[in-house]
Image: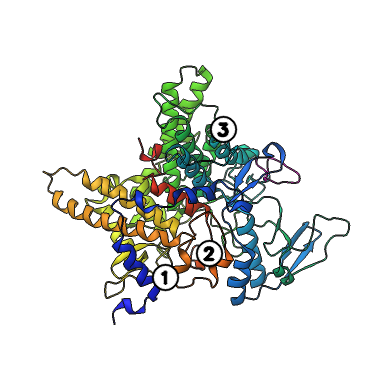
Amino acid sequence: MNGLSKIPRPLLLLMAATLLTMPATGQSAFSELEASYRFLISDRQDNGVLYTATAGDLRGQQLPLSFHDSAAYWGEHVCPASDCAVTDVYDPQAFTLLPQKTPAGDLQTERVNTHNGANIYDAATWQIAVMLGHRVNRLPLAPGQDVHALVTGQTRLLAAGHYGDSSHPSPWQTRARSNGSTFVYNRQNIVEPAQAYSFRMLPRDWLSPDPFASTPYARSITAVNLPAGNPAYQPGLISWTDWKPITGENAWAFLIGPLQAADLHFVHGRDNGYVPLHEPALINALAMLPAFAAMQSSSGGVYYAPAGTVANQGNMLVDPSFVAVENTLSLYAGLRILQATLTTTLARDSALSTADRTTITDGLRLCQAMLHGGVPAPGRTTRGLLHFLKNYAWQDGEFVQGGLMDQPGAPGPWQPSLSPKAVDVNTWGIAALGPSVIDDWFGFGASFRNWQQVKRWGGYGIGTAIWGVGFSDQDGNGINADGQYRQGVLSAEWTAGAITAVRAMIVHYQSIDPSSSHSRQARHFVEALRNDEHTMLTAMDTLRIDRYPGAGFIGTPKRYGQLFTLATKPYLYASKRYLIPFGWYANPIPSTCATAWMIMAANRYNPFLPGGGLR
């Protein structure tokens, strides 16, 4: 039977229409860019994703959240399939108000995290996109907004170390300082808040409201044992529970996001521009550099999280020997961006003091050691990130998602985790390292063949046309025995990463000398890659909020247009609600990082390259 017969008719009709109207260039695929951008610069009550902080020096600062959700989405779409009646219990010993350990309790925790949390990776993509949209696309800001002040707010939040709406601001609330056996950085303690990892997800305040509160769905919430005489504890509030300091998120939050935004502000389009050394983005980056160095193994890989960090699911602790290859790639990109930023500042700022120059050269020396091998700290050596990525991270023509590195008592330095496979580690690997590096390491065409493998197990499409990617090899995506794509789950964010990788390959294979023996093969690669780029770009509009309800995706919530009534046009995180094998739920709701990635894709901006590859 032809695989097309199993596809919902609306999806088939939409695919036919999009193929007939396929744009000649990627830029024209983004017809509502200003409306999407407006989502990123508007308060939540104004169809956006920002809130205004009230705590300490952050008072009045607009800050991003990760999602724009609604009580109706959770109540109508998620709860009918699950029992959402939950009992929250106050613990007088820990001063916490938490749901009981039930499926309904897990759902409440997810709702609260989604409604109140800002993943620092999401915020980093937001910083780039907000600056990019204004500086390059000339998209308007809201009245009274200043783009640099808006973007720098997230950097100030990380430096402050407390919640945006904290009742009692303190610089340790959002930083993973070492405490006994908790948050130990590769056998090293870090107790200074400004030098410790940030937790990956930051709340507005420690007590966080359930989106069901003050709505008809609040009837499903019961709170017991509330403390008498303490009005802070109320039904519909629970204590924040996500305390996970992760290397990859921190690489984006302290290096990639703020430094790329600073580059767009101070350097892009300016002769002799540079990022001032005392710009908050550089201050934060240099303060965090020793923590990143502490987490690097002797073999070059960087550990996923400090010892004592709880895993994404359950109460088990992360193995401190675990290295996530995607995290290592993010840090690789962040260090290259920091290296380029410091080099430019050193060369162009004639007013630097002797102490400033020493600070810069020390930072550059540490970046060099981490990237290429050397002595990152007294008594420690590393072979460098590039050594790890070349010699350990690549197996059977693709990047593995992670493994155990330099584990005491292990038979060898590296024990890879081969399942599940991850899409992003491969697309980000191509985008961050560059196809020329990968082809030089593993043979001409290695990057292209890597992408073909990812499509076979991770691609989402209709017929033989790829629409994008999901998250892993366990999503129900990939190509069947008839050569047809399956329709498991489609991710806007991860597809934008795939588009970025495909574009990098197009540039690389176009540059092959016509006299080379690889020239004919390279032309074939470029033709195939351009087709993938165009079909993915066109398909991404189906994950924009105004087009999604009519696209016919399997798993589309009923009455979606009534669950979300936004005047802006953000992109959704995924095509359906889905438990990702790496430990979190995807939801078809407006997403900060998905929208930010789409703005980067509209500008052919590669966030892994210094300057985004625009210069």
- Which residue is rendered at x = 45% and y = 63% of the image? 547
Kind of residue at badge 2 = Asn
Q: How many marks?
A: 3
What residue would you read off at disc 2?
587
Note whether residue 471 is visible: no
Disc on the earlier residue, 2 or 1? 1
Q: Secondary structure at mark 2?
A: loop
Q: State the CA–CA distance, disc 3 to disc 1.
A: 42 Å
Q: Find residue 488 and name its label.
A: 1
Residue 245 in sight in this render: yes
Mark number displayed over residue 280? 3
Queried whether the magenta region covers residue 162, the answer comes back as yes
Instruction: Tell me if label 3 and label 1 are in contact, CB under 8 Å.
Output: no
Left or right: where does residue 579 sit relative to residue 172? Answer: left
On the image, the x and y values in percent for residue 455 come to 32, 63
Q: Quadrant of the N terminus?
A: bottom left
Residue nearer the viewer, 318 or 406:
318
Q: Secondary structure at mark 3?
A: helix
